[in-house]
Amino acid sequence: MPGPLKTVIIGGVAAGPKAASKVIRLMADAEVTIVEKGTLLSYAGCGLPYYVSGVVKEQKELLSTPVGVVRDPVFFRKVKNVHVLNQTEAMEIDRTAKRVRVHALGNGKQSWLDYDKLLLATGGTPVVPPIPNINLDGIFKLHGVHDAEGIREVLAQGKAQDVVIVGGGLIGVETTEALVEAGCRVTIVEMLPQVLNILDWEMARLVEKHMESHGVKVLTGTKVVSFQGDGHVNAVITDQGTIAADMVVLAVGTRPNVKLAQEAGLEIGSTGAIKVNDHMRTSDPDIYAAGDCVESIDLVTGRPCFVPLGSTANKQGRVAAVNLCGGDDVFPGVLGSTVCKVFDYCVARTGLTETTAMQLGYEVTTAMAPGPDRAHYMPNAPSLLLKLVVDGKTRRLLGAQAVGPGAGDKRIDVAAMAITAGMTVDQLANVDLCYAPPFAPAMDNIITAANVARNKLDGNMIGVPSLEVHQMLENKDDFIFLDVRSPAECDEVSLPGATSIPLGTIRERLGELPKDKEIITFCKVSLRGYEAALILKAAQFDKVRVMDGGVAMWPYDRIDGKHSGGASPPLGMRPEYRRVSDEKDPVDNPTR
């Protein structure tokens, strides 16, 4: 009779503990051992920015079950029947003998652990760029609880007046709010032309504008050259100037931790992460891998991708556990579905961006649909700015992005389901979503966006992106930029170079518009702009287009009216912009 299944799991944060728990649920007599280099187990890494901000009050909240029990070695032994070796590093995998050499960091002892099945959940490693003086005191990563403790300590001591975040990805953007709430003057330095490259440029720019409205300086297209300080950092030197800094947070990204797998001769994928099949099995049939150390398959393109997320790690850990116990479960892939909180904005996305879809050769149609996320007559209905990316040939939904204070997460979740199911925008437009005024408009935001895409695909609406309009304005092209909003709205906020004719007066003022020039119509959200275009088309105006997204999604700083000198506030943005005092500007030579 074979003995109990010996399972060794290397990594004790997300995928590893999830897999260990599932193995025991499937095989109560299995011998499961978790090897974890760190001290803490199964902590919520995605909650670290909120621990820094104080929203999460105590460290143990990140380590606890929903009922408040801390997931430490005693918990795993007594509740899960899992043996945990924390503060223990896995040094070597002997695939022939099916054993793992481990090193106890406390006493230096080394030993071998036998296994029948091995799971690698070694996670990711923060990217630390080779920048001079990067080891100065006051320069932090935010990769684990200990990093968060260091940042909290500096903030508690009031020693971080000027903070620079290097990197405008998810971690950097999520950490920004925590630092601003602590009273810091925050500058984000991003080498790429935009923050959050998981979004298209104009959507990312809306996020940048929102951060700027909270006093954050956003310097894109800026490279950090070195750090300056005498023992402790006091400045960040960039290729655009010097920025004062009492503290620096490195948020450049994450790479898969594959050293152990490489040394064991396991196959590494094209992304640099461990290659696994849909059963989470590596090139060795007795070794599985899950979490931030593995590559996934993009469900739209079918290509390998590396998208490290805690949600993905937990799902993969469960699939791996089922299969190493002899079951048959499949992890099909990912869409890169992501959501983050940026002050009071929800920022979310799934599937392909327009940029990526075009690079892959798709015939892309996009739909921009701003509007309140519930019935407009409900008090304080927050705005939501949606973008859909559609395959113009098949009409299939390829991707979606949401920005704004409204509930973007549930719309992006709907989009993720639609993309997974291979739905067209025609099918999406008639999905039976729930409706009540406190929760959604009668035509939900994503249904409206799908209908905008359908109007474009059917030739009923010819859209023009704000990028093209901006270039036309900059080049002083000869066209009519027609604002069809009311005079009161135009007095509040207007775009440069616009001619104002309210929608209700267009039919009687057709003679004021030349038929030999292109006319681009717009309004607050471009619904009235679309209606104006239909009126002009019926009157034999042949050169009419509608600006996508209207004023609400205008991503540029050039604007006239009450908010002159800043960006147009998207729908629902409160007017009282809180800005950090200019008494001490930490940027000597900003390029904004």
Image (spheres, rainbow, N blue to C red):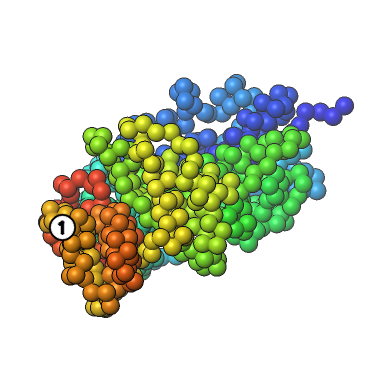
Q: Residue at x 47, y 31 (%)?
A: 63
Residue 491 quadrant = bottom left
Q: Residue at x 52, y 28 (%)?
A: 71
For label 1, the residue is 490
Q: Is residue 579 above or below residue 13?
A: below
Judge from the rendering whether residue 225 lies leftward or rightward of residue 589; answer left or right. Answer: right
Judge from the rendering whether residue 97 lies leftward or rightward of residue 533; answer left or right. Answer: right
Q: Is residue 77 above or below residue 169?
A: above
Q: Nearer the viewer, residue 483 or 167?
A: 483
Residue 273 quadrant = bottom right
Q: Residue at x 27, y 74 (%)?
A: 515
Q: Residue at x 55, y 24 (%)?
A: 75
Which image quarter holds the C terminus? bottom left
Numbered marks: total: 1
Q: Is residue 278 above or below residue 318?
A: below
| Residue 530 position in % (x across, y down) | 32, 58
Asked whether residue 171 is in view, the answer is no
Judge from the rendering whether residue 348 lies leftward or rightward of residue 507; answer left or right. Answer: right
User: Mark 1: which amino acid?
Assistant: Cys
Q: Outermost residue toward the right?
A: 1
Judge from the rendering whether residue 433 lies leftward or rightward of residue 120; answer left or right. Answer: left
| Residue 117 position in % (x across, y down) | 74, 39
Q: Residues within 10 Å of mark 1 (few under 14, many from 20)?
A: many
Q: Secondary structure at mark 1?
A: helix
Asked whether residue 435 is in view, the answer is yes
Q: Nearer the viewer, residue 215 or 372?
A: 372
| Residue 58 position in % (x across, y down) | 37, 31
Q: Nearer the viewer, residue 410 or 204?
A: 410
| Residue 199 position in % (x across, y down) | 42, 57
Which image quarter holds the N terminus? top right
